[in-house]
Image: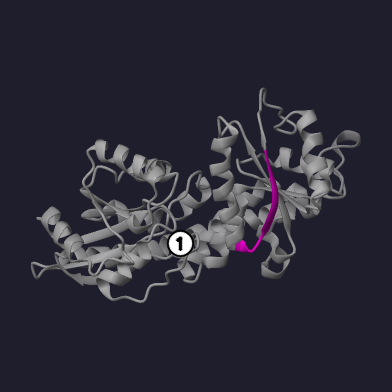
Amino acid sequence: MAFADISKPQDIFRKIRALLVVTSDQASSRTDAQRHRDELEALCTTLGIRCVAWDYFNVRSFNSATYIGSGQVERLAFEALENECNLVIFNNAISPRIQRNHEEILGIAVVDRQEIILQIFADRATTREARLQVELAQLQYSLPRLKRKWADLSQQRGGVKGAKGSGEKQLELDKRQAQARIVRLKKEIAEIGKSRDIQRHNRLRKDVPCVAIVGYTNSGKSTLLNRIADADVLSEDKLFATLDPTSRKVFLPDGRTALFTDTVGFVSDLPHELVDAFRSTLEEAVLADLLLIVLDASRDDFMMCWETTKGVLEQLGAFEKPRLVLLNKMDAVTEQTMFAINAFSLTGENFMKVSVKEDPDMAPVLKKIAEILD
C-alpha cells in the first residue's frame, strides 16, 4: 500500500494498527529512541493512524536487503503478528528495495517516515500552489517505487534475448506518465513563482519591512500571527496545520507598518522532495528583513527543535539574517525543560520568553521587533 495512491485515505487510516520502528542510526539509546518514536507517533496521529507498538533496533552492520539483521526481521514479524498490526513504519528513510523485501517477508504494508509526512502535506494542502507542490513531491518519491505496484508481474528485463516481461508495458507507461506529469508540474509551479516574485517586488517598492515567522511545526507560529495581527489563520494543536504562507499587515509601536508572514513548519528529517518543492514558499524566509523564530520551550527535545530549525535556515541561506527567537509556551515549561532553556541562553541568540496564548498582549515583542528593524 502506497499512501500516494490513496485519494481519500481518512477511513482507511482509522483501521490501521501500526508498528513503529526506530534504529540506532538515529538514536544512540532506547531513551533517545523514545523521543523519535513520540514524534513519529504524533505524525501518525495527525493522519488518524493508531500506533499500537514500537521497537528499537540496534543496527550493528547495514543489511542492503532488509536494513536490519535477519534475526531482527524475525523479531519484527513476531511483534507485528502479536499486536495484529497491518502496517510497519520505519522512522528513517528506507530504499524501495528494502521496502519491497519487508513487505514480502512480513506480508503487510511497510512505509517510512517520509511517506507519512508526504501524506500529511497532501491532506493539508488547500491552495493550488500547495497542491501542485505536494503532488510533485509525491511523484518524485513514488517514481522509484512503481515496481511495488507491479511486483506480481514479470521483471522488466528477462527471458530469451532480452524478451520483455508481461509487466514491462504497464510499468513503462506509468513511468513515462509520471515523468511527464513531473515536467508539467514544475512548469506550473514556476509560473506561480513568477507571480509571487512580482508580489514581492511590489512590497519592496513600497518599502514595507517583511518579517517571516519560522520554526518547528506546532510551535505556535499561526497563533502568534493571530495575536499580533488580529488574523484568522488556522491554528490547531496538530503538526503542519499551516502549509501555505499567510501574510498580514501589522502596526508596530513606532507607527510603522510591517508585513508578517506565517510559513510552513519545519520538522527533523524533512523529505528532500518537500524541501525542493516548497522552496518557493520557504523563500519568504530568505527574502525577509527579519526572522521571527518561534520555539516550543515546553518540549523535552527543545534543543533538537532549535538545531533542526537552524539547519533548515542554513540550507536555505537565510540563517545570517537579523533574527529574534521567541521561546513560546513558557507557562507550560517543566524543571527538565528549564535546563535546556538555560543552555540555549548561552548560545548568544537574541531571544525573549513568551506565552503567546497566555500573555496579556504582544506589545513587548512588537517593540523588540521595531528596535531590530531600526
Q: Is residue 77 above or below residue 191?
A: above
Image coords of residue 171 (percent x, y): 76, 51
The kind of residue tagged 1 is: Ile
Image coords of residue 33 (percent x, y): 58, 38
Which sits in the foreground, 17 or 297? Answer: 297
The answer to whether one can see residue 184 in this image is no
Q: Is residue 24 left or right of residue 300?
A: right
Residue at 79% x, 50% y: name it.
83
Which sits in the foreground, 146 or 51? Answer: 51
Instruction: Check the picture and name the quadrant holding the N terminus.
Output: bottom right
Instruction: Check the picture and name the quadrant holding the C terminus.
Output: bottom left
Dominant secondary structure (helix, strand or loop) of the stretch shown in magenta: strand
Which sits in the foreground, 262 or 40? Answer: 40
- How packed mark 1 is, by other alpha carbons closer than 10 Å (few <14, some 14-19, many 20 or more), is some
Q: Is residue 63 left or right of residue 153?
A: left
Residue at 54% x, 49% y: name it.
39
Which sits in the foreground, 52 or 183? Answer: 52
Q: Secondary structure at mark 1?
A: helix
Residue sitting farthest toward the top: 61
Instruction: Based on the picture, tell me whether residue 20 belongs to the magenta stretch.
Output: no
Residue at 22% x, 61% y: name it.
210
Image coords of residue 238 (percent x, y): 50, 63
Instruction: Based on the picture, tell me whether residue 48 belongs to the magenta stretch.
Output: yes
Image coords of residue 111 (percent x, y): 68, 48
Q: Which residue is mark 1?
A: 189
Residue sitting farthest toward the front: 335
Magenta residue span:
47-55
Q: Is residue 289 left or right of residue 14?
A: left
The answer to whether one can see residue 196 in this image is yes
- Quarter location, residue 247: bottom left
Residue sitting farthest toward the right: 160
